[in-house]
Amino acid sequence: MKINVVEEFVALASLNSPSRREAPVAAYLVKRLGELGREMTVDDSATLTGSDTGNIIVRVPGNAAGPTILLCAHMDTVGPTEGMTPVIRDGIIYSNGETVLGADDKAGIAIILTVLAELQAGDIPHGGIEIVFSVQEEVGLHGAKHLQADLQADFGYILDSSEEVGSIINQAPSKVDLDFVLEGKAAHAGVCPEKGINAIVAAASAVARIRTGRIDAQTTSNVGVISGGKARNIVPDRAEVAIEVRSTDKEKLDREVEAVLTAFDEAAAASGASLTVRRDAPFETFLIPETHPAIANAFRAAHTIGIEPRLKPTGGGMDANVFNSRGLPCLGLGLGIADTHSPQEHISVAQLEAGVRFVKALLMEAVAAV
């Protein structure tokens, strides 16, 4: 069976699969993998993640001696794409301009399926391959965290980066989520405002005290959501603020998180508002050294197909964070997606086709090096 990567991507991108509603893509994959003669399992992680499907795991026996390699891409998109049909103009694939395209990460899925189809011919030497199509990557890597599979791979490649094909992501940050609730006191804003405690003003005072955006080369901080208040003429008695801090340096991460916590403590105390905080750490940093076999293999593969490999860090989290924390060395791979997470998101046909060549070369070079 032959698969055209562009047609495969368009078919996948036309399926609506926001986080927790990945079932349409899962059903497509089960059918497609069956047509390719590949055995797969759908794990029971849905009971833990809340998705309408589990992760999909595929195992492909090797036909040559070599390391077992994990390939991974996620089924969910950052937002709904209902009714969206991708448009191809001048070799570039766009959404209809109203939603994200979903190339993050359906480009990764399309590339993996195309490579699987080409493996059917039997003339591509490769070691064992394990494949994971995960759920809920975009909302905290929950699918990977709750994956129910005993993976045996020696190392892996996560097809999930906006960098160009040939980019190899060997470092990603830790992330801390902070959710603040400030409780003030309601009062009539025109008759007796002095009897109230303005929770929004307290929240604004705290936000004004902290650093946001890029703190340094390794650290970022963002105030993502602020909500509160009931009406213009009521002193607001509640405000909620969602903040995240990321860094590849633990000391810097801890220092910045502590600064945010202190700012809110002081602002709440000064205003008389009460404060509650929920803290979560969705993922931990990783760094794969340049001497690791997975990186050496990726560099050989890139040179084999005539592209220049580039080792890069990222500021985003990916399923690689989870796998690395569990002792399975994994790198991210660039897919050449532009303007991700926006209605302007697009990907070129050339990058999709290069992605197929690169993944095939990764599998073949791993065997050739034995």
Image (cartoon, grey):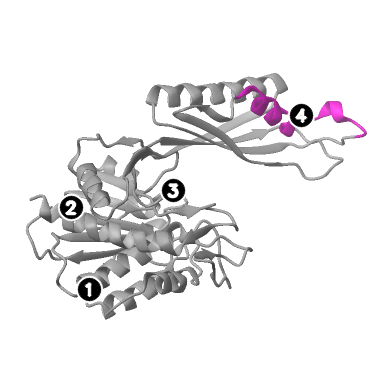
From this viewpoint, is residue 34 visible? yes
Sequence order check, earlier mark of 3 and 1: 1
Local crowd size for mark 2, using a 10 Å CA cut-off: few (<14), some (14–19), many (≥20):
some
Instruction: Please tell me which of labels 3 and 4 falls first in the chain.
Output: 3
The 10 Å Cα crowd at callout 3, few under 14, some 14 to 19, many 20 or more, is some
Q: Earlier in the sequence, mark 4 or mark 1?
A: 1
The residue that disc 2 covers is 153
- Please state which of residues 47 and 263 is positioned toward the viewer in this rendering: 263
The span shown in magenta is 190-210
| Residue 90 placement, left or right of 286 | right
Task: Decide whether residue 61 is among the magenta residues.
Answer: no
Q: Residue at x 54, y 53 (%)?
A: 341
The answer for how far apart the CA atoms under marks 1 and 2 are is 18 Å
Task: Give the structural element (helix, strand or loop) at label 1.
Answer: loop
Q: Which residue is mark 4?
A: 197
- Callouts 4 and 2 close, C-beta under 8 Å: no
Q: Which mark is residue 140?
A: 3
Amino acid carrying label 1: it is: Arg
- Looking at the rendered structure, the kind of residue marked 4 is Ile
Q: CA distance from mark 4 to mark 1?
A: 62 Å
Task: Locate residue 168, reporting x and y percent.
Answer: 33, 44
Q: CA distance from mark 2 to mark 3?
A: 23 Å
> Along the line of sight, which residue is nearer the eye, 88 or 15?
88
Q: Viewed as shown, does residue 244 lie left or right of 249?
A: right
Q: Quadrant of residue 42?
A: bottom left
Which of discs 3 and 4 lies nearer the camera? The answer is 3
Instruction: Residue at 37%, 55% (x, y): give it.
Output: 143
Q: Is residue 197 magenta?
A: yes
Mark linked to residue 38: 1
Of mark 4 and mark 2, the one earlier in the sequence is 2
